[in-house]
Image (cartoon, rainbow, N blue to C red):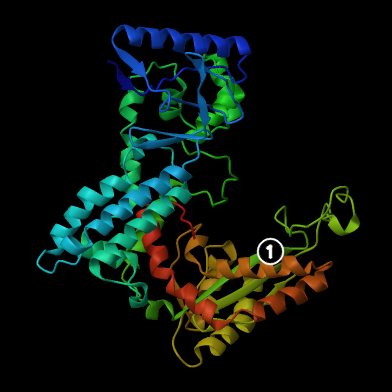
Amino acid sequence: MFWYMSCFMLMMLPLLPTQRQIYNYSAHLFFFSAACLEFGLQISLKKTVILAQPATLNPTVYINNICLSVVDKFTYLGSTVSNNNNLDAELDMRIGRASSMFGKLNKHVWHNKYLSLLLKVCVYHARVLSTLLYASETRTTYRRYEHRLNAFHFCCLRSILGVCWKDHVPNSIILERTGSSDLYPILREHHLHWTGHIYRMNDTRLPKILLYGELANAPRKLHKEWIEGGVKASRATTHRHVKEFGYSCRIPLVKPLLNHRQCQRRLTWTKEKKNWTVAQWSKVLFSDESKFCISFGNQGPRVWRKGGEAHSPSCLKSSVKFPESVMIWGAMSSAGVGPLCFLKTKVTAPIYQEILEHFMLSSADQLFEDADFIFQQDLAPAHTAKSTKSWLNDHVVGVLDWPANSPDLNPIENLWGTVKRKMRNKRPKNADELKATAKESWASIPPQQCHKLITSMPRRIEAVIKAKGAPTKY
């Protein structure tokens, strides 16, 4: 009489194994099967299969002269492993089992009016959420997988509360009522459980180097440093380990350079303006200058072309060494935008005062009529000159104090970006066309867009406070 058992073995083979190496693998399985027979055990050939990684491998392995089946995925300890490391099947199974568990508790828990909401949430965390996040610390999930899990999580919480999409209840309220959190921090916490295993690794192991090393440099440079330090790793291995830790090569965002003093000034200023309402910000006339060039850099429009049309005139982007440019002054408020001022020379204090005389006051009359307003300007030398301050005092114009290097706090910067995107599609060829296109694009900005930008001021303030004065996403 034999006891039958299924066999799960992990044997590392080269990327392109030879027939001899596959034969040796079969020999190992043969000796393993013979050893099992000595103890009265017999390997179940129906349950023993071959999972090859990468998927291009198709090895032929025998046990007792019977060829084992090659499968695309294999379920081990409740988790599905695929030959291409794809998590779609695993996530489908996780969500399916969690959904089945949630459905079984509908009558006795979720729809039971005698149970409190706190108890229902506790049951949800113990039975459903644990099923959904089973073995999540061992998986390298991408953002799209996290979105799927989080969407199912909120669907369950809404069902427990009896809230449907027609009620227009935001997710923040759902989390507040249930006392739960979204799955993103939970998944991060589960992933951190693996750090204990990495900590016990040898210092020359790649996972430990990646975890404790600075990754501001490119993988190619890291690969060079590792080779010089005696770590054996190919460039492909370096790239793979970097990607496994969630890093990807991206173009860095350009933000103004802020020193410690400027960060502290921004933090102090935002704390002073923290309690300002949208109504108060609606009384501010925001202003700024921006430079517009005929050439808009490397982020021009893309072209659709066939092979061999790379040098076709219609598929080329023209460039010049010294493109024509125009400096433009503009102003906006919650009510809309004011007239543009095109500048021919460098902005000095006298020229800036002429701008205030002919364009700033007219913008205020247009946007605020007879109501009081506060004028905003940055700390450019022409703006802070003594003669400019005297002009503002003589005309009784209240000026909003402003921290240095803070374009993320000025909503007009978003309008400049909108205008430049519209102008990029029209491709002006000279300074006159540039001015006409800028004027047309500026005039097409709706007041609703300006009002929406003004309503973002409290969020901008909170973002700077949260960043402790550092640059924000705005």
Residue 388 position, x and y percent, is 55, 72
Residue in view at x 44 percent, y 48 percent: 145
Residue 375 percent coordinates (x, y): 49, 76
Q: Is residue 277 visible?
A: yes
Residue 316 is situated, as x and y percent measured from the top left of the image, at: 84, 55
Number of numbered discs visible in the structure rendering: 1
**Which quarter of the figure has residue 173?**
bottom left
| Vertical relation: 148 (above or below) 49 | below
**Furthest-left residue in view?**
114
Q: Residue at x 19, y 64 (%)?
A: 107
- Residue 182: tell me if it is visible: no
Q: Is residue 350 left or right of residue 83?
A: right
Identify the amino acid type marked 1: Lys
Q: What quarter of the picture does the N terminus occupy? A: top left
Q: Residues within 10 Å of mark 1 (few under 14, many from 20)?
A: few
322 with respect to 463 (left or right): right
Q: Residue 9 versus residue 326: which sits nearer the camera?
A: 9
Above or below, comparing residue 13 to residue 219 in the picture:
above
Q: Is residue 367 above or below residue 271?
A: below
Find residue 274 and report its horizontal and vertical position in percent.
33, 67
Q: Is residue 298 above or below residue 220?
A: below
Residue occupied by mark 1 = 291
Which structural element holds mark 1?
A: strand
**Left or right of residue 369, residue 1 in this image:** left
The structure residue drawn at horizontal position 33% and vertical position 22%, both measured from the top left corner, is: 5
Q: Pick the residue in front: 420 or 20.
A: 20
Q: Residue furthest front?
A: 1
Farthest-out residue, bottom: 370
Quarter of the view holding residue 178: bottom left
Q: Nearer the viewer, residue 373 or 129?
A: 129
Does residue 436 appear to the left or right of 330 in the view shown? Answer: right
